[in-house]
Amino acid sequence: MQRIDFRAMGCQMMAVVASASPEAQQAQEVQQAQEVQQALNQVPIWFETWEQILSRFRQDSELSRVNAAAGQWISVSQTLWDVLQLGLAAAEQSDGLVNPTMLQALEAAGYDRSFELIQTSFATISLGRSVTADWRDIGVDAARRAVRLPLGVRMDLGGVAKGWAADEAALRLADFGPALVDAGGDIAICSHDETSERFPVGVASPLQPDENIDVLMLANGGVATSGRDYRHWFRDGKAQHHIIDPRTSLPAATDVMTATVVAPTAREAEVAAKTAFILGSRDGLAWIEDRENLAALLVLENGDIIHSSRFIQHSWQATAAG
Amino acid sequence: MNTPNKKSAYSPAVTILITTASIAAALTGWAIFANRDAASDAAASSVTTVAAVPSNSYTVAASPKPLPTLVPLIGTTPLATTAAAAPPSVKSQAQQVLPTVQPPAPTIQQPARNTNPAPRPLTRSRSSR
């Protein structure tokens, strides 16, 4: 198993490629190891390229240029187009709870710079209440691959972009063997070999960060966790976090501390985890149960841990016993 | 519709005879019906007892097999506890079996827990950092 660790998109990243099979390893061990290493060395470059397109924190990113040109049709790259389509699909699937027009509300809550800068900043800006736009007002022209934002609207593709990047990198690496890409906690696993071994993925406890609540065994798919245990800060004496509820344009008021979702892809897991987090434990778990390709584990504010009926299928306990 | 009163065409003696025969016949009939009613009551009573058992547990109530052999088919709580705690009456058996027809809770669907130590995770899912 070969691995690379690096930082990108404001997060710690990691990518792994396992040996395709013992036979292949014996026959072409040296050559294969070199090819895998070359592929892994490309991963930070891929992420840098994607970040330059998708980051809202870089003034010269493609997304920032589109945000600065609200009201006009702008032709965009295939990458920005693809991720924007995912963002709009996420809005549709989550009934607008996860949508790309939350940037103003996010900045009003204080997340107006990278999280590293927020942690070291002592600036005090009064907490404002912003008005968010309707994501349905974003114009898209597939024939010209062009986008037009409503006046006054800027986009943040944050979580969806990170999930998409993890999926895309894992898919590319899977040509060299079963692959796992961890994009700051959003994890994509891809293998072209259905008989390949499963990757053990821990679900970190938000209350005791060094401990795992469970260990998942995954050969394909995605895992993502949304929560307020890490990216939170105080403004005007009130605790703020980075997950905005579009219904209030404020950080979501929820009894969920973290929501972890297993899905067919990391980007789907990311959207579902955020949706469950915003909806709260009762409605969030019901939302997950209604979708047969999703499974969730929620850690509540009171410390309770609850999970959907399908979550145990992914646990090491089920796979080891079964 | 009202019908006008008519005088009897029979003589008093005939009337007494007929009346006596009628009373006798009526008494005999009553006795037969009374016996039949008693039988019906008894039957109805036993049916009522069985009918009181919910349909989903009817097989259990009617079956001569001991309850513990049936409960695993329904997929319920441990049998030994159920059988030991169940009083012999049909009603009590029904009460014991009733919860098994409810949708199983997620915990029941869970496979047996593995007693081996958890594998060491390659990485961990957590909120973005």
Image (cartoon, coloured by chain):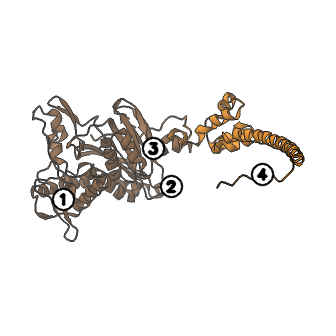
* Residue denoted by label 1: A137
Residue A9 in view of the camera? yes
Mark 2 surroundings: few (<14), some (14-19) or many (≥20) residues within 10 A: few
- Front one among A24 and A123: A123
Q: CA separation, marks 4 and 3?
A: 91 Å
Q: Are marks 4 and 2 in contact (CB under 8 Å)?
A: no
- Quarter of the image that includes the C terminus of chain A: top right
* Residue denoted by label 2: A195
The mark nearer the N terminus, 3 or 1, is 1
Secondary element at image label 2? loop
Q: Which residue is drawn at 18% across and 59% down?
A: A137
Mark 4 surroundings: few (<14), some (14-19) or many (≥20) residues within 10 A: few
Which of the chains bears the disc numbered 3?
A
* Residue denoted by label 4: B7
Which of the chains bears the disc numbered 4?
B
Q: CA separation, marks 4 and 2?
A: 104 Å
Q: Residue type at mark 4: give it.
A: Lys
